[in-house]
Image (cartoon, rainbow, N blue to C red):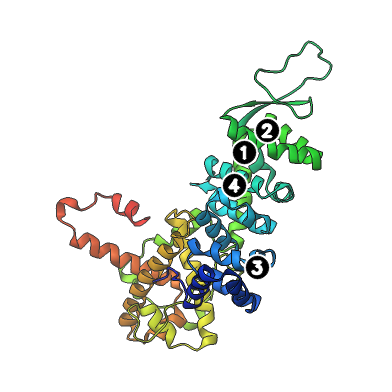
Amino acid sequence: MFKPALLPQARELLELARRDRAAAKRALAALELDAQLALVCEAPAARRAELLELAPLPEALIPLLPPAELCFTARAIGLHDSGWLLEHATEEQIVACLDLDAWSAGAPERGKLDEWLAALADAGEPTLLRTAHALDMELLVIEVRARARVTLKPSGDDSWEPPSPAHTLDGVFYLEPLRDDDDFADLTTFLRTLFENDYWVYYRLLQGAQWELESDSEEWALRWRDGRLQDLGFPPFEDAKRIYAFVKPDQLGVLAKADEYHPVGEWVLPVWMPSLPISRDQELALFRALAQLSEEERRPHAFAFMALANRVAMADELPLGDAESLPIALEKAARLASRGLEHVAQANALPLPEVLRRATLERLFRVGHQLAMREQLLAAPKSAAPAIGEEDEASSH
């Protein structure tokens, strides 16, 4: 339902590019920048590189991409081939890409950090330097420690010998590689860029890599990352799991008073806002109800729906940097919220739009999830019924 398909205009442009690349570039250049952006973002991630390469001013278009869309595009291209894309990205976009893609289960994912650092090195020294200034020092310390053991030459000890094998850029800090030569070469490129352009950051980073506790670095890096993700609409994991909180059976149909409804606020979305399949004959009740609201009344519900999908993605621990995760989260959010909406509407003998005006989508999702779990338990053979305690564990997923 939510996976983007190649728009006819984009398909025509790409087909024209195969016959006459110059004509395709002229056709794209004739569009306003906002229209170019929409064309790129509404195409599947795997086809966006072709469109961006036709753009007359990619350096103006790429910084406009929502940060998650830049991440999806870079992953679809392949990070090893994404240097040209990251070269034009803003610091905020790059930091968001790492926040979304280089973490797993609340901890930095070393392999993906390596990939992003290599891609940023391919983007050139200015991009690498901008990134070093934008990223949290704690995350950089974690990356250095994962690749090398850092030793500071003791002052005034002429008999001291550096560890072997070890490399140094300044005769003060010595690095022993912990991985293969390619990994260490990427790290050396990064550190040399800092050494030659910002010695204070270089010095602070290597001091931290030698002396700071890894647990402290990971804790602070996670705090900074969680704060930025909340700005993008992704709540902390423990908060997100509230969508699966138990609802007492006698409370499933309860509807709050109209004046108790508090809409979700608006924020800068990290993704391109999808076109919701709103129509009066739509299969899902949520979209049928939205079709009966005015455009002004519908807007806060659209943000609430995106907030709900973000909670689903966090609670289900979907990989946030994967373009497939968003459609999965949106589909689940729509399906279970629709189920809850229909139940509450029937219990209160109210039309669907009126329930939307008085119930949050999170509440409707919880009701829908509870009903789905109950049906699943009733349909399962008795021998397959979960033991006490297992139902709660299953409901968290």
Callout 1 crowding tier (Cα within 10 Å): few <14, some 14–19, many ≥20: many
Instruction: Work out whether residue 321 can be spotted.
Output: no
How far apart, in angstroms, are the residues tagged by discs 3 and 4? 21 Å
Callout 3 crowding tier (Cα within 10 Å): few <14, some 14–19, many ≥20: some
Front residue of this view, candidates 180 and 278: 180
Residue at the spot 60% in from the left edge and 77% down from the top edge: 27
**Residues under numbered marks 3 and 1 in contact, where contact means CB atoms less than 8 Å apart:** no
Q: Tag 3 or tag 2, which sits nearer the N-term?
A: 3
Q: Which of marks 3 and 4 is in front?
A: 3
| Residue type at the position of mark 3 | Leu
Residue 361, percent across and down? 44, 73
How far apart, in angstroms, are the residues tagged by discs 1 and 4? 11 Å
**Residues under numbered marks 4 and 2 in contact, where contact means CB atoms less than 8 Å apart:** no
In this figure, which residue is indicated by the disc labeled 4? 116
Residue 326, percent across and down? 46, 63
SS label for mark 1: helix
Residue at the spot 76% in from the left edge and 13% down from the top edge: 160
**Residues under numbered marks 1 and 4 in contact, where contact means CB atoms less than 8 Å apart:** no
Residue 100, quarter of the rendered image:
bottom right
For the N terminus, which image quadrant? bottom left
| Residue type at the position of mark 2 | Ala
Residue extending furthest front? 19
For the C terminus, which image quadrant? bottom left
In this figure, which residue is indicated by the disc labeled 1? 143
Q: Tag 4 or tag 3, which sits nearer the N-term?
A: 3
How far apart, in angstroms, are the residues tagged by discs 2 and 1? 9 Å
In this figure, which residue is indicated by the disc labeled 3? 61
